[in-house]
Image: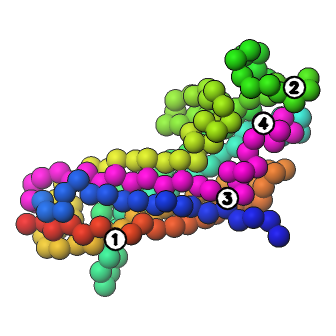
Amino acid sequence: MLEQSYISDVKLVASASRIRLNEPLTLDLQFKVDGHIREVLNQETWTSSYDKHDTVFLIKYLIKIQTISMKKRDVVEPIKFVRKASFYWSRNPKLPPPPPNKKIWAMIVMDDIPNLPDSVEDAKMLLFDVKRSLELMGSRIGKGKHKLVAYVSASWGKHPYTESTEIEAESDEVEVECV
């Protein structure tokens, strides 16, 4: 049986537990994708994929922040973003030793900014570790005590090293009082 991929360490932290309607609230969210997909993405896999003309890996993320009550409602618009690993032939002498006669590496694109990681571990962190800061006004939450929770999902398509997958998780509740 194949090891499963999953989302771990989902943490939602509010900048304050009590705010006014006209004050901003900052919510810090972090999580990471672990399991099978994190393990199989390595230099050997990049080389094999490159040889099969499979040179791009896209992972799509979706974040929803909702209130927990009888009727769940979004506190902010759902946030969708994509991270991309593009496998290419590199001549960088500083990279780790490649398999014989190959020097395939990954460029990671986060928020439309290309990154050239120095190691396979750095590439995995850039691709699979997410930290987002969201700011909203107290009026968006409404008056009273509210419990907020973050729902996150990640999905990717089929490749020689993985099947098409969608995984989901949620954070613990964060209580915020708006006066």
Q: On screen, 179 above or below 99?
A: below
In this picture, is 47 found above or below 89?
below
Tell me the colour scheme of the image: rainbow
**Which residue corresponds to mark 2?**
102
Tell whether label 3 touches label 1 (CB within 8 Å). no
Decide which of tag 2 and tag 1 comes sooner along the chain.
2
Question: Which residue has dot 1 on it?
Answer: 173
Judging by the rendered image, the residue that carries numbered circle 4 is 43
Closer to the chain start, of discs 3 and 2, is 3
149 or 17, which lies in front? 17
Numbered mark located on residue 35 in the image: 3
Q: CA distance from mark 3 to mark 2?
A: 27 Å
Secondary structure at badge 1 equals loop
Q: Amino acid at mark 2?
A: Lys
Give the percent coordinates (x, y) of residue 59: 62, 49
Neighbourhood count class around disc 4 (C-alpha, 10 Å): few under 14, some 14–19, many 20 upward: many
State the CA–CA distance, disc 1 to disc 3.
25 Å
Instruction: Judge whether residue 31 is colored magenta.
Output: yes
Image quadrant where one finds the C terminus: bottom left
Residue 66 sits in quarter: bottom left
The secondary element bearing badge 2 is classed as: loop
**Where does residue 114 sit, x and y in percent of width and height?**
57, 28
Residue appearing at x 12%, y 59% in the figure: 19
